[in-house]
Image (cartoon, grey):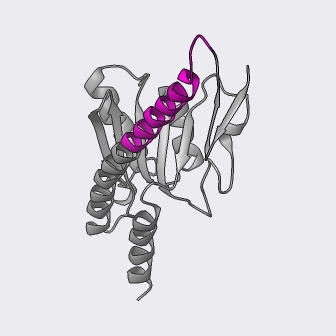
Amino acid sequence: MPTIYSGSWVGIFSVDTGIIVLRDLYILILNDTQKVSARLNTDNSYMARALELAQQAADVGEVPVGAVVVKDGEVIGEGYNQPISCGDPTAHAEIIAIRNAAALVNNYRLTGCELYVTIEPCTMCVGAMVHARIKRIIFGAAEARAGALQSQLQLMDGDYYNHVIEWHGGVLADQCGAVMRDFFREKRK
């Protein structure tokens, strides 16, 4: 089959299909672009809610981290940092959101759920997400001192867990990082 070059378009000509290959490729790219755009809008929306929860933590003197658990487009669990308020070192935003989601669905396994959190999760929280079978972690800002996905550790890069979680960071990263910086700047005054 001859290859046709026309401006920036490249297609494979076939008597049977004409330039259908080119058209199908264009439609495929367009559909993928629309899906990515919709996914980014969705991620931004849930991260905005996590930021609201982080502000609630800051308002009561806790480190401002917020988390949201989503299943099939519905929020099923929320939390913000409360170790000081609860006297519980495990009361991180992610853990509280997971506990609330598990209570709602009456199952400790949160298969198919996504967890949005304003800051890259720590080792404990990533471990809890593995046990809960979270499908996807989306975080805002990296956590240079304790981040367990990319910053200090890369816990999901190995093949030693019985469950692997898809993850990505950087969603509303500037806003998420600013909440933390502002909180600690105020604490140092």
The image shows residue 130 at horizontal and vertical percentages of 55, 31
Q: Residue at x 35, y 55 (%)?
A: 82
Q: Residue at x 62, y 63 (%)?
A: 145
Q: Residue furthest bottom?
A: 189
The image shows residue 85 at horizontal and vertical percentages of 31, 58
Which image quadrant: the C terminus? bottom left
Q: Is residue 34 visible?
A: yes
The image quadrant of residue 39 is top left
Q: Height in image: 62 above or below 130?
A: below
Q: Which residues are magenta?
A: 15-39
Which image quadrant: the N terminus? top right
In this view, the residue in front, 27 or 64, is 27
Q: Does residue 25 show up magenta in the picture? A: yes
Q: Is residue 91 visible?
A: no
Q: Height in image: 115 above or below 172?
A: above
The image quadrant of residue 157 is top right
**122 with respect to 70 (left or right):** right
In this view, the residue in front, 140 or 99, is 140
